[in-house]
Amino acid sequence: MENFQTLKLLDYFRKPIEKLGVDYSNMRKILQVKLTMDKRRVPTIFTQSNTKKEGNQFLKSLWLYALFGLAFIPFILLGDNYLFQMSIVFGIAMFIIMTSMISDFSSVLLDVRDKTILQTKPVDQKTISASKLVHVIIYLFYLTGSIMTIPLLVSLFTKGILFFLVFLIEIIFVNLLIIVITALLYLFILRFFDGEKLMDLINYVQIILSLATIVGYQLVIRSFEFINFDIQVSLKWWQLFVPPLWYAAPFEWVLNGNTDVYILIYTVLAILVPLISIALYIKLMPAFERNLQKLTAQSTGKSSGRKESFIGKWICHSNEERTFFRFANQMMEQEREFKLKVYPSLGLALVLPILLFYNEVRFRSLEEIASSQYYLAIYICLLIVPTIIMMLKYSGTYKGAWIFRTAPIQHPALIFKGTLKAFLVKLFLPIYILQSFVFGFIFSAAIIPHLVAVLLSSFMYTVLCFLSLKKALPFSESFKAGQQGEGFTIFVLLLLIGPLIGLHYVSSMVSFGVYFYIAVLLLVNYFLWSDRTFQRVKIRFND
């Protein structure tokens, strides 16, 4: 096997690792196998590429993360109000690293195969746990390095060596905090739940973390006020719960000499919390590994078959279509890997329109907003449509797709129609309905016709996305196969949301225009959702 450069670097830390009671030789061999197997793993951010190419696709994706790092440069060069500048930098960095940790490395932290395979070998539990932690640290080293290398170099040449050193040390503590907090959170969940319920709960935790990070941006921004283009710092007690401010405080203290009590407390928290967390994680590691066995337990939840059958009778026109509607519903409800990749984006789609509205309230009164067309912000929920439709053809149990070939179906049109309707009912409509209640409360019942127009536009947009993307039978391909270069198509489809908003806006400027627009959308949807449209889809089905 290949002797990876990261392992050669790790050799320099052999003695400290062995002092912790870890068998370094065994740990190194385990990591060598893991890194070899990782050449097949596809990172979430790089799932648009053709992953049939050889090599570690995660490493090949690092240039994309480096582009994110360019966004930090303006804030570093902005001036010397470091509490503001570096709060923004660390807020964005923590969001990128945390979401990557959740999407790409949760499978490593929650991997039960180590225990199954290695415990039959002469390898102690501490060594197995250490190899798992070092495995994550190696990839976070690559990830953080690709994001932060350019900003670090810029800070070195523009702000000096002291700024650079503080920045570098803070980045290390941020990574420690993210790793440990994620692991401890999963440990807490594992303590009280098992099997499928645990996996569902982890999906919900991922949604909550994504939402919390976005809300955290708002808290960071609220910590500062712009007065005549001067940034005024407003330190309050609740900011003790905003980690980006912790890691910005040392810059303010070391470089600006600010010894405000809050600055000193933030600095202590930035260092102390990660160290306490890592100590707590090491102490609780045996319990974490024991509880991981709960992931192998299967729980039988109550089936929602009756509800699916009732809805299917209303929106599906044939028994075959209803069958695939129920099938897609169950797959989206039970498919772990699908939920892992899709559910966090649902949370973002839910909260983004509301956050945009909240930001608008800062500059205009509620009465001014209620009399405007700002309700069109609900179109943002359409951002999830092309990505999820693309994901509908992937599954962790894709080998079971042979059932499609054996079923007595002449054309896959009914399969696709049933699956798309299941997506709308299961994933899209709950978000849309919840947002409609919020916007209806703000803008009154007068926007109901507009909400109907948005709903019909989303139905039309769903079919357009399906027709534009590459076709495959639902849940019939492996996630590891990648998305075969569909990133540009999705980008174009996302741009299409702009014209939809424009058409709606123009119709709202004419008396009864929105009702005419609804009539047009009904007609277009009638033709787009017809069997004839789906029967034109070219796909190898009867082979």
Image: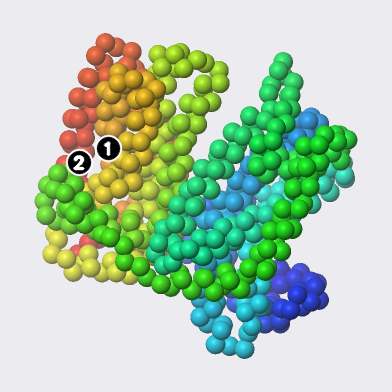
Residue at image location 62% in from the left, 89% down from the top: 122
Q: What's the residue type where badge 1 is placed?
A: Phe
Look at the image and tell me in which quarter the N terminus lies: bottom right
The answer to which of 543 and 271 lies nearer the viewer is 271
Q: Quadrant of residue 232?
A: top right
| Residue 42 appearing in the image | no
The single residue placed furthest to the left in the displayed view is: 318
- What x and y, as percent, mark residue 150? 73, 46
Look at the image and tell me in which quarter the C terminus lies: bottom left
229 relative to 123 in the view: left or right: right
Label whose residue precedes the other's in the sequence (1 or 2): 1
Q: Residues within 10 Å of mark 2 (few under 14, many from 20)?
A: some
151 relative to 332 in the view: left or right: right
Q: Secondary structure at mark 2?
A: loop
Residue 408, placed above or below residue 117 = above
| Residue where numbered disc 2 is placed | 529
Residue at image location 44% in from the left, 57% down from the top: 201
Q: What's the residue type where badge 2 is placed?
A: Trp
Q: Quadrant of residue 114?
A: bottom right
The single residue placed furthest to the top in the displayed view is: 511
Q: Residues within 10 Å of mark 1 (few under 14, many from 20)?
A: many
- What x and y, as percent, mark residue 131? 64, 73
Residue at image location 58% in from the left, 88% down from the top: 121
| Residue where numbered disc 1 is placed | 459
Residue at image location 74% in from the left, 48% down from the top: 270
359 relative to 534 in the view: left or right: right
Q: Nearer the viewer, mark 1 or mark 2?
A: 1
Q: Secondary structure at mark 1?
A: helix
